Every structure is written in structure tokens, then in C-alpha cells.
Image (spheres, helix red, strand yellow):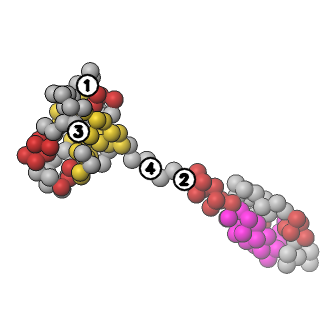
Amino acid sequence: GGCFARPPMAAAMPSLPWGGDVGAGKGFFGGCDKGGGKGGKGGKGKGGGGGFRRQMWQGMTLPQKVKQDVKLPEGELSIGFEWKFIGEGQCPSVVSVDPSSAVAQAAIPGYSLLRVNGLDTSMFSEKQISDMLRQRPLTLRFGDQ
């Protein structure tokens, strides 16, 4: 029986950073279930698995929340967008944006008005939000909720 419990090549095998299948399959060492299985475990489990996890972590970008801040200075009369109150506990939605306003660089219809002067808009009533939007200077944060 040409079965090795641990094939001699497995020790010299490089662990691939991308978690490649070198030594992972039965076919690589020939028809020995035991050897192939062990080689597969060693090759993939430690080196390959670790490399794969590392790459996953490195390449895994958490879904980026889009957030844009705009400052409306003293004397700026228009807020530059129309908004709709969705309901208690939710941020108001941007309905339309004046393309010539400062807000146009930060917001598009469908975005939410997340913060007004650093305060979370989901905590306020429609009247409170419209009162806050009359203040100047004003910092607005828009984004997807």
C-alpha cells in the first residue's frame, strides 16, 4: 500500500495567501483516502483557511454608509431642498434638490436628512425639524439611512 499518513511534500508546500487548493484534493496525492484527506485538511485547514480568512477580512469592505455634510452660512435664506416627514423615529426624506444650492453637492432625492446641527432628525417631530431648518448657520448631514 502506497498510503502515507502525511505525504512528505505537504510539509514543503507553501501556504498560499489566496487559499489555493494545492494539496487539498484527493486527486493530488493519488487514490489514498487517508493521505488525501489528511493532506487536504492540512493544506486547506491551516494555511489555506488562514489565508482565505485574511484575504476575506482585508478585502471585505463593510457597506459604506453614504454621509455628506453641508453648512449653510448666516444669511443663506433657502435650504436648497424639499423634504418629506416619514414618521416618528425615522429621518425625513429628501424629495427634491435645487441644483444651484450648496445642498446639491451632498444630497439627491431619496437620501435622508440624517442630522441637523449634529442632532439626529429621527428624534424630532415634523414641526421641530422645520423650526430647526430655519436656524442659521446650519449644518446638515444627508445620506442613505
Q: Real-space Cα distance between discs 4 and 1?
A: 28 Å
Q: Earlier in the sequence, mark 1 or mark 2?
A: 2
Q: Mark 2 — residue?
A: 60
Mark 1 residue element: loop
Q: Nearer the viewer, mark 1 or mark 3?
A: 3
Query: Which span of residues is magenta-colored?
Result: 28-50
Q: Does residue 111 appear in the picture of this structure?
A: no
Most extreme residue toward the front is 74
Circle number at residue 138: 3
Q: Real-space Cα distance between discs 1 and 3?
A: 14 Å
Q: Mark 1 — residue?
A: 101
Q: Please state the horizontal and vertical placement of residue 82, each as a whole percent of the image.
A: 17, 33
Q: Real-space Cα distance between discs 2 and 3?
A: 36 Å
What residue do we see at 18% from left, 28% from top? 75
The three-letter code of the residue at mark 2 reads Met
Mark 2 residue element: loop
Q: Real-space Cα distance between discs 2 and 4?
A: 9 Å
What residue do we see at 43% from left, 47% from top? 64
Few, some or many residues within 10 Å of mark 2 (<14, 14–19, 20+): few
